[in-house]
Amino acid sequence: MTAPSASPPDGFRVVPGRLDRATQEALRDAIRAVVAAAPLYRPTMPRTGKPFSVRMTNCGSLGWVSDQAGYRYQPSHPVTGAPWPPIPPVLLELWQELADYPAPPEACLVNFYEPDARMGLHQDLDEAEFGAPVLSVSLGDTCLFRIGGAKRGDPTRSLRLASGDVVLLGGASRLAFHGVDRIYPSTSTLLSQGGRINLTLRRVSKVIGAIPDPAIVG
Ligand code: SIN
Ligand code: FE2
């Protein structure tokens, strides 16, 4: 008998197939334009300087970056120095429909996974606002996504995320450990060269009068 998989924390929501093919294609093209203005680059880990296996860029007023100095949000691209391009309107609409939060996202991290890229288990902790969910969109090849609890050793559950799927890490799941164990090559025709794009929309700064953070109120 296989062990039962952990149930994910409250507030973890998967919306399979939320974006139809035409919307995925429009979003892919919008992200191509973002990447033309703000090229993908390979960040490095704090302290060790080890390169990430994913390449990244951002759109929005703030972008998430990592280098030997640490993780942080900043208003400009670390290589070109230019401000990040704006978040495509289709993503802002998706946030309005699904995030249940009274202010728009400030950052959209664009992660590009080659077939052999992965992302280790981590928490998204660099925002001042944990009352807003992290909204994540998958495009291109399917991945094996893993989510656990608020502690690193908590049991985890694995699920496949396909092109057009949307995931929300809200409520108690906002601080859940999560990562990407593998990419399944050639599972989508959306990206002509293959690979996977993940877009994560985040609210970084607090909004006065927003819903209290459930993790703090208890
Ligand atoms: C992330 O946690 O930044 C990315 C998650 C994913 O690629 O699905
Ligand atoms: Fe994350």
Image (tube, helix red, strand yellow):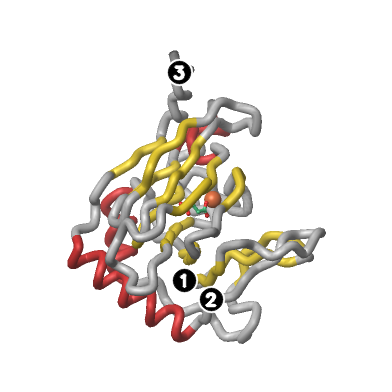
Residue under label 1, please give it: 60
| Mark 2 CB within 8 Å of ligand 1 | no
Residue 107 in sight: no
Picture coordinates of residue 19 (x, y %)? 23, 57
Question: Which is in the foreground here, disc 1 or disc 3?
Answer: 3
Residue 23 horizontal side relative to residue 176, left or right: left
First in sequence, mark 2 or 1: give its number. 2
Residue, disc 2: 40
Q: Please, is residue 15 above or below residue 194 in the view?
A: above
Q: Is mark 1 on a helix, strand or loop?
A: strand
Q: Where residue 12 sits in the image (x, y, percent)?
A: 41, 36
At label 1, the amino acid type is Gly
Residue drawn 40% across and 58% down?
185
Task: Answer with mark 2 or mark 3, whichever residue precedes in sequence.
Answer: 3
Element type at marker 3? loop
Q: Does any portion of residue 126 appear in the rendered image?
A: yes
Using the numbered discs, state the Cα–Cα distance from disc 2 to disc 1 in whole angstroms: 15 Å
Q: Is residue 46 left or right of residue 118?
A: right
Residue type pointed to by label 2? Leu
Q: Secondary structure beneath disc 2?
A: loop
Give the spatial CA distance, label 1 vs label 3.
43 Å
- Seen from the viewer's position, the closer of residues 209 and 111 is 111
- Tell me if the residue at label 3 has its CB under 8 Å from ligand 1: no
Query: Would you name the residue on which mark 3 appears?
Result: 2
Residue lying at 42% horizontally and 76% vertically, measured from the top left: 86
Residue 45, how many percent across, how many down? 72, 60
Closer mark to the observer between disc 2 and disc 3: 3
Q: Distance between the residues labelled 2 and 3?
A: 40 Å
Question: What amino acid is at disc 3?
Answer: Thr
The quadrant of the rendering that contains the C terminus is top right
